[in-house]
Image: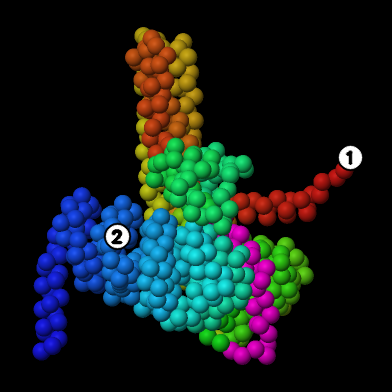
Amino acid sequence: MEEIHEFERERRALDQMKGPYRWAMYEDWERLRRYYKDNPTEVLNPLTTYNDNALHLVVFAGRMDMLQFLISLIREPQMLRRALIMKNRHGNTTLHEVAPSGNLEAAVLLVDLDNNVRGELADVSYEGVLEIRNQLGETPVYRAASFGHTELVQYLVKKVGHKNIMPHLQRSSDQTSILHSAVIGQNFETALWLLKEYPDLADRKESNGLTSLQLLAQMPSAFQAKFRKSIWKMLIYKCLFNDDNIDRIPPNDLESRINQPCQSSCSKKITKFRSPGSRMMLEKMQNENSLLELTYLLIEKDYSWMTSREDDVRRDDDTNHTPLLIAARNGISEIVKKMLELHPQSVEAHNIDEQQNILHVAIMHRWLEIFKLIKKSRLITSRMAMKIDSNGNTILHQAATMRYYSADTQRLGGPALQLQDELLWMVRVKKIISPHYIMKHNRENKTAEQLFNSEHAKLLQSAQTWIKETAQSCSTVAALVATVVYAAAYTAPGGNDSNGVPVLRHSSFFFTFAVADTVSLISSLASLVTFLSILTSPLEYQDFYRSLPFRLHLGFTLLFFSLITTMLTFTATILLLIHPQKKWTTSLIFVVSFLPVPVCGLMQLPLFKGFSQGLKYIFKKITRIKISIFPVRGN
């Protein structure tokens, strides 16, 4: 019965606050202001089912003006104190709710108010708002770090004081460190500042036993470096935001940032370019730079790779892997490269359960960049290549298996190119493995070649179907182009005179027409023959290594070239017929006529890219063979 009455009271209270709730949610701040001005005693009444009051909501929204107004309505110190420590059902006070918006001004106001009220009440038994934890065991400092607001974290840390900061550096419910929380949220600028201030955080582990570096090694998306790998974005960043002479505010003068928001030349530039895109670009670029610096600092302090010895206790999941192996598995070459640079012996680390080293892992997951990093040292490669895992698999078996293969990560144009890439991996690995390992059987009594054939049977079938359908479609297009340009050769623009000689033969455009039509016919017929040779091929494994991809690439190139020359023929015909008097008319016709060509090129770009990757490797190999047979002699 008592629960029913409690529910009824809550329902009535929420019904009464429907208006303020709606105005807050839809950001109608003026109506909300008028309501509380007329009803100041209702400021602390809950508006949501989670017991959030108006202070919680305006702080969450980052509205400093509304926060100041609502606080001005609370005049008694006891009520103000109650307002500051009042929690919602998540255990969050108003200061906790500052974290999502990162409003430094609001945090300064609330902390100063708390200090003033505690001084007025002269009761030291009151817990300060900085010390209060929510239901997850997070203090405001911890929560601010979770949301990645570095300046807010710096301010709150200063107010807590370095002597009292240690309890704030972990969540009491599961002992997760503040550095882990910042890394999990990919707030790398905040994480970097915390690591520099408190270096011991690097050694702390999550409840599941992972260090911060191991967490980073599980985040391949964070290392994609969309901005660092984009030349034009880097250029914009350098032009707009880089300034070596920025007047930086010292860390111990954070309050001055509030009164001088445009103090630095960098912030003036950001104010000038206020578009959301430019601000987002700056934040992402800074976060990426902080990520690299954070990674390097963590690697310097990491010696977990020394724990993967033969006599170590077997563990589960990623605690069984060093950061190097986790990074190799996820293709994060930045971590692998720096790890091998600072801790060269870490390359000897291996998975305790499966006895796989970094070479096994790189080959298994098809990370070519990491494979090349290991190959830089002939001795390391030889040592790694001798390792056989707990299932009897050599590194050649790892190249043969599709256990971890993902077409999405390889980003190739079709099944035929995927199969070619798999065959290339077998060739790469055979070059670094001792010959007597090639015929070695694993625990399933299979050699690497037998394993490759059984694992890739479905891919072979898909590749055969795909390349047949592609060749058929392209041969049809090539035949149509050949028919059109062949017919065009016998229907000269402007017609012929009584002797059968083209009337417009003396025009420069007629010469262009004749040459382009001839070249288009030759290239389209050559393309047709190339695609027909694919259709008559046996389509076995080895055909997909060199022959078929080369023919397909050649056929596509010839077909694309025939389309270009066909459009050139068409353009020359139009110009011969209309006799344009102005140059801009001629230019416009050329542009409009050639529009299908770049569209076709862009649509087939991924396919051409896939071809080029495979052919580049093959031609490199052929060049080396030629050099070895016909060495270049000095004069």
Q: Are marks 1 and 2 in contact (CB under 8 Å)?
A: no
Label 1 sits on a secondary structure element that is loop
Going by the numbered disc 2, the residue's amino acid type is Ile
Q: Which mark, by number, is residue 62?
A: none
Is any part of residue 250 visible from this angle? yes
Depicted 139 relative to depicted 261: above or below: below
Q: Is 633 on the left or on the right of 442, as rendered? A: right
Asked if 396 appears above or below 26 in the picture, the reply is below
Q: Residue at position x 56%, y 87% from top?
A: 315
**How would you classify the magenta stretch by its main secondary structure?**
helix
Please provide percent x and percent y for residue 324.
62, 72
Three-letter amino acid code at the position of disc 1: Asn
Q: Residue at x 61, y 85 (%)?
A: 352
| Residue for point 24% across, 72% down | 51
Question: Residue tagged by mark 2?
Answer: 71
Task: Say which mark, if any, is on residue 635.
Answer: 1
Q: Give how far apart the Cα atoms at labels 1 and 2 are.
A: 90 Å
Point out the residue furthest to the right here.
635
Q: Nearer the viewer, residue 298 or 514?
A: 298
What colour-coding does the image apply? rainbow
Evaluate whether residue 460 shows in this view.
Answer: no
Rendered location of residue 94, percent (x, y): 34, 66
Question: Which residue range is magenta in the image?
Answer: 287-314
